[in-house]
Image: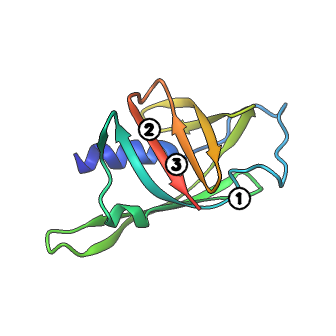
Amino acid sequence: MKKILFMILAVTVLAACSNDDDSPQTGDDLILGKWYLKDARAGSVSLVTECQKKSNIIFNLDNLASSEYYESNDADECNLESSNQGSWSKNANSQYTFDVPGYDNLTGTVSFEGDTFTFTSAEIAPIVFTFEK
């Protein structure tokens, strides 16, 4: 289950720009900044541990992104499992496209509410990710 969660988390974290240059990025894009994993939910089942809630993504104005993924080891210590660099692209409205190994181009919807956003995609349904600033 941990490997599946990590792979799906990577979908939202490891992103590469699409070739869509028709939607210029502006400094007022709500996705900019540092976001922490709050939840990954399949229906009513949460897939995130307290340790994994330290996992985070930083979206920068230049469409670059960096991430850190935390996981508990057998001694129940929370450790940095991996860190990655990538990029992101906004298509239109609330649609973002990510180029992720194993998924090619993954398009999903990002919905903002206050200091949180959710990411959903038909390609990884029924899992919904929630991030918090």
Q: Is residue 21 left or right of residue 1?
A: right
Mark 1 falls on what kind of element? loop
Disc nearest the viewer among 2 and 3: 2
Which residue position holds label 2?
Answer: 128
The reply to whether the C-beta atoms of the residues labelled 3 and 1 are less than 8 Å apart is no
Which residue position holds label 1?
Answer: 60
The structure residue drawn at horizontal position 30% and vertical position 47%, both measured from the top left corner, is 47
Disc nearest the viewer among 3 and 1: 1
Relative to 10, is 126 above or below?
above
Quarter placement of the C terminus:
bottom right
Question: How packed is label 1: few (under 14 Cα within 10 Å), some, or many (20 or more)?
Answer: some
Decide which of 23, 126 is in the foreground and name it: 126
Mark 2 falls on what kind of element? strand
Kindly report the distance in space between the C-alpha atoms of the residues bearing marks 1 and 2: 23 Å
- The amino acid type of the residue labelled 1 equals Asn
Q: Earlier in the sequence, mark 2 or mark 3?
A: 3
Mark 3 falls on what kind of element? loop
Disc nearest the viewer among 1 and 2: 2
- The amino acid type of the residue labelled 2 equals Val
Question: How packed is label 2: few (under 14 Cα within 10 Å), some, or many (20 or more)?
Answer: some
Which residue position holds label 3?
Answer: 14
Task: Give the label on residue 49, or none.
Answer: none
Q: Earlier in the sequence, mark 1 or mark 2?
A: 1
